[in-house]
Amino acid sequence: MSIQTKLDELIAPYKNSASIYMYDTDKLFYSHQEHKQVPAASLIKLAILATQLERHEDLNQTINISNTPVVDGAGVLKLMGQSQWTLNALLGLMITVSDNYAANVMIDHLSMTAVNQWLGENGYADTKLQRRLMDTEAKAQGRENLISADNALRLFRFLMEQYPQTQTWFLNQQFRGKLPLMMDETATDVRIYNKTGEGPLIDHDVARFSKNGHFIDVAILTWGITDRLAVISLMAQIGQLIYRSL
């Protein structure tokens, strides 16, 4: 059975609530609803990261984070007592521990307008930054951050290829319970770089599986599925299928 056929079988029960975009090195390998625009959750951090790196600022410069309100959710910055942080440290926290407070500091540093302008100028039409992370008031007003599987994977591949320093952050990303779940601790012959996103009835993962110079990149986005264990199982099975195909 081909990997494409197996993927068809795996996503069949969720085909109206999932999108997938996959590359085998530089060849488009599999796609399903890849331009479906859905709430981005933490995948919007890929757009923030790309915009910041494309400015080519000195990442060792220090900024004061105290003017950005602390928010809940993922991250450790809110627990730290220091107000001065380098851009490099903030970006690292935003990816490795998906730090929402760090992401909001970066939004304030860049401006939403600047992020959306960069996205528009670079062909990411499905991606919109319309509120800070954890801004429940803005969310209630209908302002949502949006992305598609196509845009998420292209942002991820762009960062991996154009800014190799991000590879360490993606490789050491602490949320590994989706695509890498079934082999992350045991498959020592494969390197898995990834970034997740999640929220109410939202689960996403974007990853690169690399083995002996061969790599497969995949984005899977899901929405509106009430059985979260089934979603996690779906992603884990897709990750294992990719690993076995390398």
Image: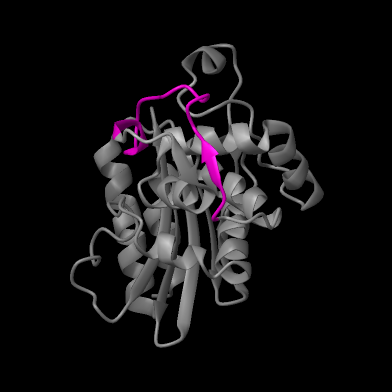
Q: Quadrant of the N terminus?
A: bottom left
Residue closest to the eye, 2 or 134: 134
Residue 92 is situated, as x and y percent measured from the top left of the image, at: 44, 53
Q: Residue at x 75, y 46 (%)?
A: 118
Q: Residue at x 61, y 20 (%)?
A: 143
Left/right of residue 164 with respect to residue 14 in the rendered view? right
Residue 192 is situated, as x and y percent measured from the top left of the image, at: 37, 68
Left/right of residue 15 with respect to residue 230 in the rendered view? right
Residue 202 is situated, as x and y percent measured from the top left of the image, at: 42, 35
Residue 64 belongs to magenta span: yes
| 42 in relation to 241, above or below | above
Q: Is residue 40 visible?
A: no
| 34 in relation to 37, above or below | below
The range drawn in magenta is: 60-79
User: Which image quadrant for residue 23?
Assistant: bottom right
- Colour scheme in the image? one colour
| 180 in relation to 40, above or below | below
| 192 in relation to 178, above or below | below
User: Which image quadrant for residue 171?
Assistant: bottom left
